[in-house]
Image (cartoon, rainbow, N blue to C red):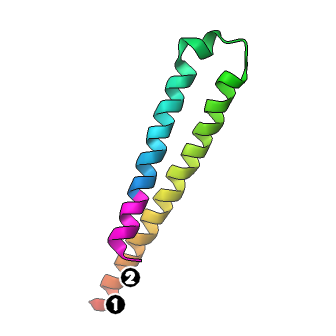
Amino acid sequence: MQISSALGTALHGIQKGLTGMDKNAAKIASVEAFNSQNPADVAQPLVDMQNNRLQVEASAKVMKTVDATIGSLIDVVA
């Protein structure tokens, strides 16, 4: 896997996770969910937000690994 490809994938994962968090936060804050008698209307977006958080964390770890790899390659070349 090329480094630029790994960085692009990590960045895309972070962006996708943050976009999902934004959408789920809007669902939770909506008047319909707030006034709903069905707890699932709020519970599902909360679960989805946890999944989004995990996606962002995993993508950030990929980015850190790529950064460390680049640092190691530079040390070997230098």
Q: Which residues are magenta?
A: 1-10
Residue 46 percent location from the top left of the image: 63, 32
Provide residue 54's location: percent of width, then percent of height.
58, 50
Instruction: State the quadrant of the N terminus.
Output: bottom left
Relative horizontal placement of residue 42, taking residue 31 as reference (left or right): right
Amino acid type, residue under disc 1 in the picture: Val
Query: Helix, strand, or loop for circle 1?
Result: helix
Q: Which mark is residue 76?
A: 1
Q: Nearer the viewer, residue 23 or 68?
A: 23
Q: Residue at x 36, y 62 (%)?
A: 8
Gap in angstroms between the C-alphas marked 1 and 2: 6 Å
Queried whether the magenta region covers residue 72, the answer comes back as no
Q: Quadrant of residue 4?
A: bottom left
State which quadrant residue 11 falls in: bottom left
Disc 2 residue type? Ser
Q: Quadrant of the C terminus?
A: bottom left
- SS assignment for the magenta stretch, majority: helix
